[in-house]
Image: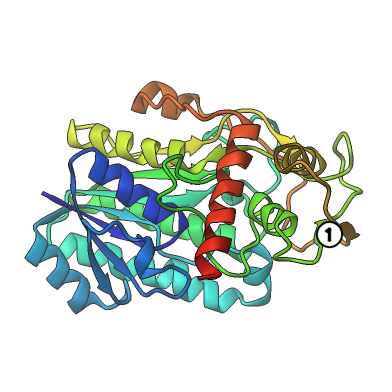
Amino acid sequence: MTVLVTGGAGYIGSHMVWDLLDAGEEVVVLDRLSTGFDWAVAPEAKLVVGEISDQPLVERIIQEHGVHEIIHFAGSIVVPESVADPLGYYLNNTVASRALIESAVRTGVKHFIFSSTAAVYGSPRQMPVDETQTPAPESPYGTSKWMTELMLCDTAAAHPLTFAVLRYFNVAGADPKGRTGQSTKGATHLIKVASETALGKRPFLEVYGTDYDTADGTCVRDYIHVSDLAAAHRQALRYLREGGASLIANCGYGHGYSVLEVLDTVRKVVGHDFDVRVAGRRAGDASAIVADASLARGTLGWEPVHDDLERIVEHAFAWEAHLARRNAR
């Protein structure tokens, strides 16, 4: 059996590929390389450059490689960008995912794992937020992901396909072995941006809003190490293979840090200060969101091992320093 990883040349996808290979799985990657990199794909995996909406290509990959499972990461992920370009997000995230799901059904794929987001909750009524809360996304990004979740639910009710939807909270860090990390140019992830600023790759960092209803006025997020997230997908794959029913589960640690707390941690790790400036709020940003991930822990048997903000920052900064050396060659 071979696992198809869409978006496997990107940040989270490339970590997933390494995790699967470490576990002895056969892997084929489909990525259009719009934000990913061919060098980020583990050499043991087969890389196909193309679109997930190219159904003849997708179905040929599935048939030629004996794919029984798909782990779907491909998509656009920037909340403010989705506000400015909603139709682009619905095309790239929702319409393209519909084509991929249809190809999975046509070719008899058994299991489908989908990369969703905590953005589907919008501003939760209570925290930590669990999966029983009705989604109320506040951005086209969150809506585009929720629409794909709905398509999977309806498809699984009509066809012999089981799925796991994992709703990510704020993913950060890098592979502890230094094999891959967040490499996208112009990325908006706070810890990456702070690491770039600390290394002089950016002249300053902007804090988007200091007037939120939080302890220090800045947004609070639940930061999860990317390697723990990859492990959650592998556990979801095992669960589905063992006959588990389709499910939707949060992936986070259950506690949050404000923007200013994260920046203080970055300063501690790098050993020096850097230029931080205050800007206005960004459209689509919720003030605070923290996960209740008891379902993933209990049902999938997921046991995070990197639940430490300082460690997350250390791994992210080490990867950023590696990129600086790599790009200087």
The vertical placement of 277 against 237, above or below, is below
Whether residue 153 appears in this view of the structure is no
Q: Residue at 91% across / 48% down in the picture?
A: 211
Question: Is residue 217 found left or right of 38 in the rendered image?
Answer: right
Say which quarter of the image contains residue 220.
top right
**Where is residue 302 drawn, in percent x and y?**
39, 27
**Where is residue 136 drawn, in percent x and y?**
63, 50
Question: Is residue 227 found left or right of 186 in the rendered image?
Answer: left
Q: Residue at 46% across / 27% down in the picture?
A: 304
Name of the residue lying farthest toward the front: 329
Whether residue 162 appears in this view of the structure is yes
Q: Residue at 47% across / 51% down in the picture?
A: 116
**Where is residue 231 drawn, in percent x and y?**
37, 36
The vertical placement of 192 against 239, above or below, is below
In depth, the one of 278 and 296 nearer the eye is: 278
In depth, the one of 211 and 178 nearer the eye is: 178
Say which quarter of the image contains residue 276.
bottom right
Question: Is residue 176 found left or right of 197 in the rendered image?
Answer: left
* Mark 1, secondary structure of its residue: loop
Q: Residue at 39% across / 42% down in the picture?
A: 230
**Where is residue 118 drawn, in percent x and y?**
57, 46
Question: Is residue 63 found left or right of 15 in the rendered image?
Answer: left
**Residue tagged 1:** 281
Number of numbered labels in the structure image: 1
Amino acid at circle 1: Arg
- Pointer 1: residues within 10 angstroms few (<14), some, or many (20+)? some
Q: How is the image coloured?
A: rainbow
